[in-house]
Amino acid sequence: MAQSSKKTDYFPFLPLVPGSLVMLAIVAYPLFEPFRLSFTNTSMSSNYEYVGLENYEKLMSRGSRMVRAVAPTHS
């Protein structure tokens, strides 16, 4: 009599793992690197230091170009 085992065989999917990890890295790096760099004072060079939220404070401060550009669209 055959045993009715509900064990799933994952072996056929193992060759997909390396390619999936490479694809994840290719997609994830460009998504997260700009976010990380937004907390630095880098300007197209390898020398930078972390400035925290200073860039965002400049972006949202009164009189900044961004605020002047976006303000008319929300009035």
Image (tube, grey):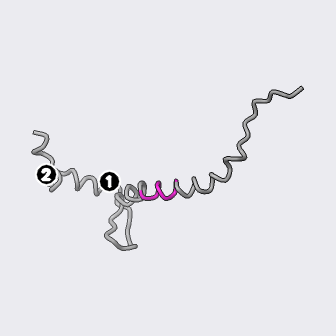
Q: Position of residue 47 (x, y in %)?
A: 38, 73
For image coordinates 35% across by 56% down, the residue present is 52
**Image position, residue 22 (x, y; %):** 55, 58
- Determine the main secondary structure of the stretch shown in magenta: helix
- Measured as percent of width and height from the top left, residue 73 is found at 12, 43
* Residue drawn where x is 38% and y is 55% of the image: 35
Amino acid type of the residue that numbered disc 2 sits on in the rendered structure: Ala
Which residue corresponds to mark 2?
69
The residue that label 1 is drawn on is 53
Amino acid at circle 1: Leu
Q: Relative to the observer, which residue lies in front, 59 or 9? A: 9
Q: Quadrant of the N terminus?
A: top right
Give the side of residue 38 with respect to residue 58, left or right. Answer: right
Is residue 2 depicted above or below 39 in this figure?
above
At numbered mark 2, what does the secondary structure look like: helix, strand or loop?
Answer: helix
Residues shaded magenta = 24-30
Quadrant that contains the C terminus: top left
Q: Residues within 10 Å of mark 1 (few under 14, many from 20)?
A: few
Query: What residue is shown at x 15% (from left), y 56% (from top)?
Result: 65
For mark 1, give the secondary structure.
loop
Q: Nearer the viewer, residue 19 or 64?
A: 19
Is residue 27 one of those drawn in magenta? yes
Residue 31 x %, y %: 41, 54
Q: Is residue 66 magenta?
A: no
**In the image, farthest residue toward the right:** 1
